[in-house]
Image (cartoon, coloured by chain):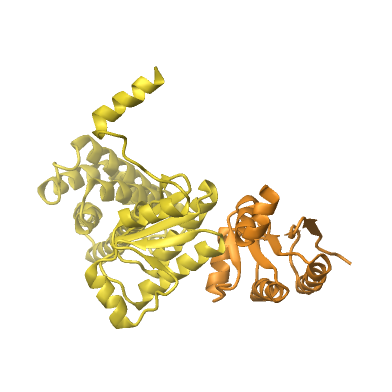
Amino acid sequence: MERIPILRMGQFLLVTIQVDMHDRLALQLQDDLTEKISECSSRGVLIDISTLEIVDSFIGRMLANIAAMARVLDAETVVVGMQPAVAITLVELGMSLSGVRTALNVETGMELLYELRGDFHSEMGG
Amino acid sequence: MSKLPEMINKHQEEIRTDWLKQMNSSVRRADLMSNEELDAQSRELMSAIAKGVKSGDLANLDGPAWDEARDTLGAISASRAKQGFTTSETATFVLSLKQPIFNAVRRENASDPAALFDDIWKTTQLVDKLALITADAFQNVREKFIARQQEELMELSTPVVKLWDGILALPIIGTLDSARTQVVMESLLQAVVQTNSRVAIIDITGVPTVDTLVAQHLLKTITAARLMGADCIISGVRPQIAQTIVHLGIDLAGVITKAKLSDAFALALQRSGQVVTKVNGGNGAGKRTLLRREE
């Protein structure tokens, strides 16, 4: 069974979606990610979708759901690297993903996560 | 079998001379076209027509025998559209061919009124069709001009400007409709990716009116930019537009709006943790200080 790998980076989890998302894969990711967050007691999740070229409303809702679930488990979610075409599609579908934080690329996404978890920033920086 | 095709072929040069004379007296536009060019065009068209009539098919000009005539007419229309001829002037160029052919037909059929009438009718049909082809081609060329200009206007009117490291500006001039919003949105998002910008300023100083549709388009663009990780600031909101927005009940909550582009730029700098400061003692003195420091 195909799976999307979830990498642990200190207090954060890193998910890079590099294959075409289909519905079952998305549900699997949702399961795995929530599992992993509680297992590692992660404080942040970074989802890189820079290679994702096609989205539908299901994938859009899944992103929003993951963010909401992570928040319940006390982790912030940042979605990074969305392609222009994907952004336009989501807007046209009426999905503004208002609960999801976004950043341009992985670098700025990590910065944002550290910013959101200010306490950890000082810990790791010092 | 009508003698017309044979006759046109035989008297080709004669008809052409007559035709040129005719044009000189009626539709000649010396300001737009030289004599040599007109001469070349008429020669080309006449020989193409002669080739066409050889097929004997004068009623149907869609066949392969008339390919050359149609191409020639297309080329003539295109060049005339560029030179600034009007539609009627271009059509008259072809229509003025009628009388010269009539003259030739009359000379040929002087003794036989029935054949004369028959040939004249055929000639009329033929020349009218040729004229219609010309008018169609002329209009096509003009329509292509308009379409191209529209496209150029669209591209011209949506520039994305890089103001500073990580700060983009998008000055919108003119009314925003759906097609334009699409172009604006795409070029903005593309620029965000290319320049890695975190802040985009949409300046609507040049937008004459804002209605619910325009506002909706703007909000869509802002949401799309946010999804990619860039913040948008709307600037250049004029007092009247502010009033309209409130009267229409458009909800701009969650969108940062500023009255001036400079205010938006200041905020963008602040957000990206940058400041612009004055160098001590005005411009010239400041330069000197800098130079001395470098020494």
Please state which of residues B161 and B49 is positioned toward the viewer in this rendering.
B161
Colour chosen for chain A: orange
A92 vs B201, left or right, is: right
Please state which of residues B230 and B87 is positioned toward the viewer in this rendering.
B230
Residue pictured at 13% horizontal, 45% vertical: B24
Q: Quadrant of the C terminus of chain B?
A: top left
Q: Quadrant of residue A83?
A: bottom right
Question: Looking at the picture, does residue A39 appear above or below residue B96?
Answer: below
Question: Looking at the picture, does residue A110 appear above or below residue B256?
Answer: above
Residue pictured at 37% horizontal, 63% vertical: B234
Q: Residue furthest left?
A: B25
Please state which of residues B244 and B84 is positioned toward the viewer in this rendering.
B244
Q: Quadrant of residue A30?
A: bottom right
B129 vs A64, left or right, is: left
Percent coordinates x, y for residue B170 in the rendering: 38, 55
Residue pictured at 50% horizontal, 62% vertical: B225
Residue pictured at 70% horizontal, 51% vertical: A124
Colour chosen for chain B: yellow
B189 vs B234, left or right, is: right
Please state which of residues B3 and B39 is positioned toward the viewer in this rendering.
B39
